[in-house]
Image: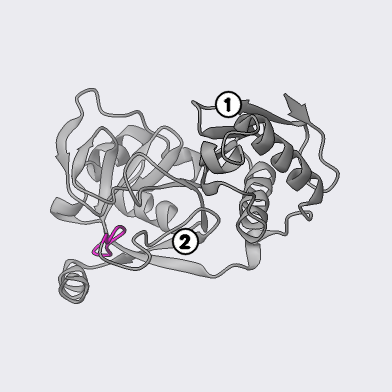
Amino acid sequence: MSLSTGSLLVENPVQLYPLGDSAVVLQFGEGINQATHRAIQAVGAYLEEHPFPGFTEYVPAFTTLTVYYDPWRASKAGHLDPYAEVVRHLQKLLRAVPAPTDVAASVVVEIPVCYCGRFGPDLAWLADHIGLTPAQVVALHTEPEYLVYMIGFAPGFPYLGGMKELLAAPRKDQPRALVPAGSVGIAGKQTGIYSLPTPGGWQLIGRTPRRLFAPEAASPSLLRAGQKLRFVSITEDEYQHLQEHES
């Protein structure tokens, strides 16, 4: 099922399809770009302000927004088809969502990163792989403002857009059994930050002392989709100092 929207600045009609018996996926296209991202953020924000009966939560991704609902409530206690009711509400919502605004004016979150020694075990390899010095890699990695496209893989793990294409690198042939939390890595044309200690195959070039996921906090994830961030290079002494204040 597809729907042409009057206010969203998206190239193609939004596709709607079921995910199990309690979710609807809104597909905004196939390509990863900022226009699609802004549309997804606009729909999510509007949905929070105008929830339909039975709405529970939504999960944004690169090109989709998955909307979860309570089938019993959405069906008005079994009197209606819950999926059809949710789709009806979403179609109405998509026609009403205002055109998304540019996220460029949002506050840029600074993420301190120590790129030296044990914190960046793959930095030298990456530098050699692309024909640069480690210092040049760090300079290129800390130059852009990155856009948080989505949180996924692990709680609080940000998938970022905006990395210099020169820094692109393949995943490791043999993933590490355990990557420390805070590790900053590169895989393909993307860079991201491991929020929890997990296995992983990204090339690790640094580590931040910031906690990206704190389950005890009111807002457990430090970052959210739609934010912008910048990496800031710090020394090992600065890392230890900041880590003490994080714990």
Q: Is residue 236 above or below residue 123?
A: below
Identify which amino acid the numbered label 1 is placed on: Pro
Is 234 on the left or on the right of 38, as rendered?
left
Image x and y of residue 148, in percent: 49, 52
Identify which amino acid the numbered label 2 is placed on: Leu
* Mark toward the viewer: 1 or 2: 1
Image x and y of residue 238, in percent: 21, 73
Instruction: Using the numbered discs, state the Cα–Cα distance from disc 1 to disc 2 in whole angstroms.
Output: 33 Å
Taking the spot 26% from the left edge, 28% from the top edge, the residue there is: 172
Image mark for residue 108: none
Q: Which residues are magenta?
A: 209-215
- The image's colouring method is one colour
Most frequent secondary structure within the magenta stretch: loop
Taking the spot 23% from the left edge, 41% from the top edge, the residue there is: 122
Residue 123: which quarter of the image? top left
Find out whether residue 213 is within the magenta segment.
yes
Q: Quadrant of the N terminus?
A: top right
Residue corresponding to mark 2: 229
Is 83 on the left or on the right of 141, as rendered?
right
Q: Nearer the viewer, residue 52 or 238?
A: 52
Residue corresponding to mark 1: 18
